[in-house]
């Protein structure tokens, strides 16, 4: 079986101490590069950053960008995402295309790559998201298999609508779930010209907890169960990169402890164990493009209901919080101003100002300024990031409309 590891980075991670941002880049992303280069040189892996993150690192931690550049197209494949890490399903089609195109510009300008695969934040889905991805030039995008099952299997929908199966300790012997199901192990078309690659909490989320040292997680059993088909592919990890090297939100999310983003260097030893298990059992570790290009594609299209999201959640979880309601109401007003300014713009200078206004609006849609909901709430700096970008976008639009 072909297996892949994808590490999703997020420099606007909710409640991450902002003064530790560069530390996280070094301790997680930089350490991941060192890990693969030293322990598994030449072995393939995948990493994702939003366009804003790439621009930030190019300016503030260029040594990490340089290390990524050295191995891009060799062992490392880069995966793309919307520029400001927005929940694409919660915004108009035009916003989503802008968000992805801004990222594509950053990837090509900073890294010299045009990624083929799109990371869809929080797995949030509506029928426009694949169209956004295709319009921006992606060949494939991640799809949440657990959402797919909830939408297409009545028994699973009945058992999981309670939310219990979204828990990390979901029963590995769940009779409703077939770990050899071809929809998990073979690429499937979403729309013409766009392929779906599945990720699942039933593997990724367990591995996240395993990296944190959770002794309740039996990774051997999980890996044996989900590689039993021994054909097609399996994405073993498609989760936050920050869980390699730092504790991220683990203790806050799963154990209600205030501790977050502490160093945990031993997580790399656990990652080593999983990779070595895969190699010892004869599995081929690949880039995501290898999956697209070499694994046979199923003929049936991926169909999900609008509003789905991963972890048993729905896209509205990120649009219904107090901060989201505040920011999105302002954003709707600003968007209309930008469109009016865009219609009036004639000179190259004015068109560039419109472009910058769109970029600020896209940044204001950052998901981590909208989550978590009360009583935890985003950190003040997460809120300020969204608010400051809204102010900047409106100021540009107002100036053009005078």
Image: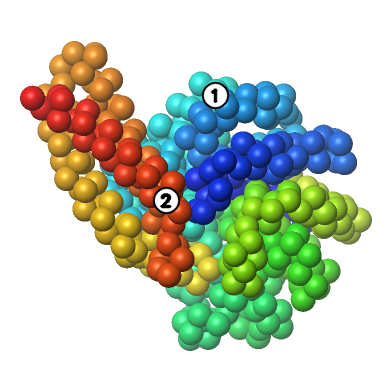
Q: Relative to the observer, which residue lies in front, 80 or 2?
A: 80
| Residue matched to label 2 | 380
Q: Quadrant of residue 94?
A: top left
Say which residue appears at 77% left-offset and 76% top-offset: 216
Q: Is 24 displayed left or right of 386 in the figure?
A: right
The quadrant the C terminus occupies is top left
Residue 80 in percent (x, y) is at 53, 39
The residue located at (56%, 48%) in the rendering is: 17
Secondary structure under badge 1? helix
- Residue 161's x, y, as percent? 46, 82
- The image quadrant of residue 326 is bottom left
Residue 104: x percent and y percent? Answer: 46, 31
- CA gap, disc 2 to disc 1? 23 Å
Callout 2: helix, strand or loop? helix
Look at the picture and state if 138 lies above or below 312: above
Image height of 376 relative to 334, above or below: below
- Tell me the residue that label 1 is attached to: 59
**Mark 2 vs 1: CB contact within 8 A:** no
Q: Which residue is drawn at 15% across and 24% down?
A: 400
Horizontal side, residue 300 vs residue 76: left or right: left
Name the residue: 53% across, 43% down.
18
Position of the N terminus by quadrant: bottom right
Number of marks in the image?
2
Nearest the eye: 298 or 187: 187
């Amino acid at each position: 079986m072909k297996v892949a590891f994808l590490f999703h980075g997020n420099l606007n991670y909710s409640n991450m101490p902002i003064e530790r941002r560069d530390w996280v880049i070094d301790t997680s992303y930089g350490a991941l590069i060192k890990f693969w280069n030293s322990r598994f040189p030449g072995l393939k892996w995948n990493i994702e950053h939003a366009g804003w993150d790439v621009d930030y690192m190019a300016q503030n931690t260029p040594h990490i960008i340089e290390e990524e550049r050295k191995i891009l197209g060799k062992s490392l494949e880069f995966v793309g995402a919307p520029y400001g890490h927005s929940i694409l399903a919660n915004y108009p089609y035009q916003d989503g295309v802008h968000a992805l195109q801004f990222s594509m510009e950053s990837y090509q300008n900073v890294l010299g790559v045009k990624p083929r695969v799109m990371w869809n934040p929080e797995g949030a889905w509506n029928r426009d998201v694949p169209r956004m991805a295709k319009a921006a030039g992606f060949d494939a995008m991640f799809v949440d298999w657990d959402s797919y099952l909830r939408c297409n299997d009545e028994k699973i929908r009945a058992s999981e609508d309670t939310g219990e199966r979204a828990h990390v300790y979901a029963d590995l012997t769940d009779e409703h779930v077939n770990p050899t199901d071809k929809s998990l192990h073979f690429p499937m078309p979403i729309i013409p010209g766009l392929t779906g690659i599945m990720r699942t909490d039933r593997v990724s989320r367990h591995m996240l907890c395993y990296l944190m040292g959770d002794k309740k997680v039996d990774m051997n059993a999980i890996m044996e169960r989900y590689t039993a088909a021994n054909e097609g592919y399996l994405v073993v990890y498609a989760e936050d990169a920050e869980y390699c090297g730092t504790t991220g939100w683990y203790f806050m999310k799963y154990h209600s402890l205030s501790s977050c983003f502490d160093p945990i260097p031993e997580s790399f030893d656990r990652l080593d164990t999983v990779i070595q298990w895969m190699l010892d059992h004869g599995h081929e570790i690949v880039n995501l493009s290898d999956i697209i290009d070499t694994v046979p594609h199923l003929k049936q299209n991926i169909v999900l209901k609008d509003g789905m999201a991963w972890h048993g959640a729905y896209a509205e979880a990120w649009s219904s919080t107090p901060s989201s309601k505040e920011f999105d109401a302002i954003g709707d007003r600003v968007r209309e101003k930008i469109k009016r300014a865009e219609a009036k713009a004639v000179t190259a200078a004015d068109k560039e100002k419109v472009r910058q206004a769109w970029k600020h609006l896209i940044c204001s849609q950052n998901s981590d300024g909208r989550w978590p909901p009360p009583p935890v709430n985003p950190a003040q700096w997460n809120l300020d990031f969204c608010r400051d970008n809204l102010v900047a976008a409106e100021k540009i639009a107002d100036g053009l409309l005078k």
